[in-house]
Amino acid sequence: MNRKRRLTLFVSVSAVLLAVASALAWRSVAAQSGGGPRVGPVPSGRPAAGAAPAPQAPVPGGPGFYSQSPVPFRPVVQTYGWAFFGTELYNPDPGYAYYAASLPLPNGATITKLVGYYFDQCGGSDLVLTLFRCLLEDSSCEVMGLVASSGSMGSYRYAEDLTIDYPVVDQQSYSYIAYLELPGGCAEFLTLVNVRIDYGFEANLPLVTRQ
């Protein structure tokens, strides 16, 4: 299923005022019955291995959740371009670009899952989202988890990593960042849609002694 995207720019100019521009962006997808606007995710066929269509119901997990849109992400090098389609982050340039965002995760929580929501209709190019913890004393970082897009489909999807290294959040010694790798040449057909981190807390049971 193809996804058609259009960006319409309305510009009003007068002799005594500066030009004022506003942009209205929307997506539409041609349905098999003859076309029309798409509301919500529309899976098209079986997803590629390692990826799943974003469901109507929430992705299971938790019990705790930290969710973040891509809006706080910024390029790690000033020359990397970045742009948004709605709130979805994409790379407008022809070459690879890398972005990062800080994650204020709750101290003492045990991370159970990394979930990346994405749109990938760019054959042969996949985005990669990595969860890092970085020492406060220097710039060294360690990989905790990683997800990637897979295949080309005209629908929103997600990928998840349930194998988290160094899962206990230690804000006394580390900061936490999400690091995104976006190939170039795909524009808004390869986007990061959202990030979710699932976590829980270890139960501290009281010591019970028998009299």
Image (cartoon, rainbow, N blue to C red):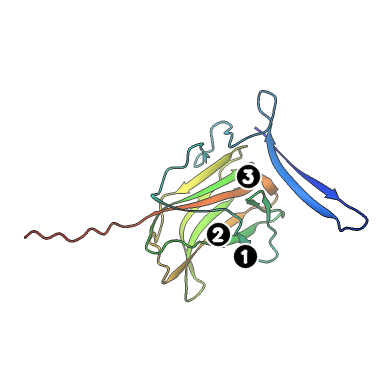
Instruction: Say left or right for 115 vs 108.
Output: right
Q: Which residue is mark 2?
A: 179
**Cβ atoms at labels 1 and 3 below 8 Å apart:** no
Q: Which residue is mark 1?
A: 76
Q: Nearer the viewer, residue 54 or 71?
A: 71
Q: CA distance from mark 2 to mark 3?
A: 21 Å
Name the N-terminal-most of marks 2 and 3.
3
Q: Earlier in the sequence, mark 1 or mark 3?
A: 1
* Residue at the farthest front position: 16
Circle 3 residue: 124
Separation (CA) of disc 1 from disc 3: 24 Å
Seen in the image, is 123 located left or right of residue 20?
left
Residue 146 drawn at (x, y percent): 49, 54
Residue 66: percent from the left, percent from the top? 47, 54
Q: Amino acid at mark 3?
A: Gly
Q: How many marks?
A: 3
Mark positioned earlier in the residue sequence (2 or 1): 1
Q: Amino acid at mark 1?
A: Val
The crowd level at tag 3 (other Cα within 10 Å; few <14, some 14-19, many 20+) is few
